[in-house]
Amino acid sequence: MISQLARTIKASPTLKLNEAAAKLREKGEPVIHLGGGEPKSKAPLDAILNCATQLNTGEIRYAPADGLPAMKKAVIRYTEEYYDRKVGPEHVVVSSGAKQSIMTLLYTILEPKDEVIFPAPYWVSYPEMVKLAGGVPVAVVPEDGTFQPTLREIEETIGQYTKAIILNSPNNPSGVVYSREFVAGVVELCERHNLWLVMDDLYNRLVFDGTVVPNAYQFARDLGESSKLVVVQGVSKMYAMTGFRIGWAIANKQVCEAMANIQSHQTSGPVTVSQWAAIGALSGVQNSIESLRLTLENNRNVLVDRLRTIAGVNVTKPSGTFYCFPDFSAYSFDSQKLAEFLLERVRVVTVPGKEFGMEGRLRISFCGTIKDIMDGVERIKWALDPAAPNELFLGDRKLVRDWQ
């Protein structure tokens, strides 16, 4: 009935959780969503005004497949300011979100059965996207139990079918920022083995404690038209503009031409008004990012402190993003069952670690309110700790522990 490829692709677990939480809320259930990847702050005023101005003209037309010229100019300025890298418009492809940028890039560079390497834990969509493009996903799980593999582990995974490596730093779901030495080493590795390196930099200004995110361009020897370094960015996370669906890729001219051709048949150009909103965000006052970053840093501190009060839970403090990836294996190694248990028993949404390539863990988001974070962790602790009081009140609803 459906194709073999379609049968191999799983639904996005985060979107499925959003749907489940929404249905429970519609029924009046007191759900706390700690699984989301969406900042609660509003889009920057400059983005809204720029979008509204365009809407008010009534002239909402098709955009070029690779993005509006004005949008490309904004990306070029952004890249020069935050990456110290000058590029031309022929090196920029604007897409309907960073997810489409990566997907279109994979269509562009992969042949059937080509392998794409990425460290675990990894963003849930990487394996499915690689499979959709006809490739084979290859996750590298660090042997030492940390969130950053060694260069040796990466290199030992490279084989005759390896075509690309994807690095996401700061990392979703762990919040780890890969070290300067690691990023430099992977750049050198890719150039030596003639591999593509895709830098998924979507969270790179949402970092804490003075952390500096390594800039891959600084380590590359080849930055000409034969360069296989691709940087992917977007406005969804840092500017809290998830619904606008605008991202972009910086790559060599040949790749950008091919990506534009694919997008022309896939979706045509990104939504015009969304691009004007993104132009406003990139070109306007940047204090919204710092405001969001400070809020997230405080939220992170509260979450980590609360999680560390749960006996047996091991927490690595995130250096960026708005996710934490604690180890709950002392309670259950089956993260799917644990996430379902917490949703069923105490109405807290988390994301199973197995979806990110590591069992026994849950991804917990701290981009919500402080109250949700505190109440959510308190519910988790009550559900797991056998020494906790036998009853818990969720508003007017009384829960009684009837499990061990």
Image: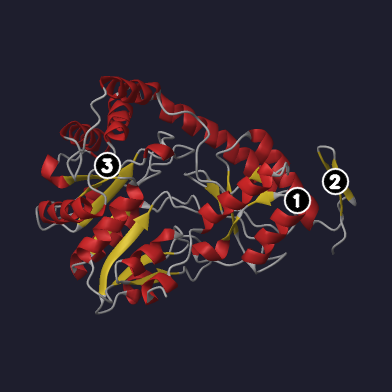
> As shown in the figure, which amino acid type bears the numbered disc 3?
Pro
**Residue, disc 1:** 346
The residue sitting at the right extreme is 390
In the image, which is nearer the foreground, mark 3 or mark 2? 3
Q: Label 1 near label 2: C-beta < 8 Å?
A: yes
Name the residue at 27% across, 66% down.
Answer: 164
Name the residue at 86% across, 51% down.
Answer: 388
122 and 53: which is toward the camera: 53
State how far apart marks 3 and 2 are (Cα): 48 Å
> As shown in the figure, which amino acid type bears the numbered disc 1?
Val
Label 2, residues with CA under 10 Å away: few <14, some 14-19, many ≥20: some
State how far apart marks 2 and 1 are (Cα): 9 Å
Is 15 located above or below residue 106 in the figure?
above
Number of labels in the image equals 3
139 and 399: which is toward the camera: 399
Label 3, residues with CA under 10 Å away: few <14, some 14-19, many ≥20: many
**Residue, disc 2:** 392
Name the residue at 18% across, 59% down.
Answer: 228
Q: Label 2 near label 3: C-beta < 8 Å?
A: no
Label 1, residues with CA under 10 Å away: few <14, some 14-19, many ≥20: many
**Residue, disc 3:** 270
Is 336 located above or below residue 380 in the figure?
below
Earlier-in-chain disc, 3 versus 2: 3
Q: Is residue 20 left or right of residue 279?
A: right
Residue 295, quarter of the rendered image: top right
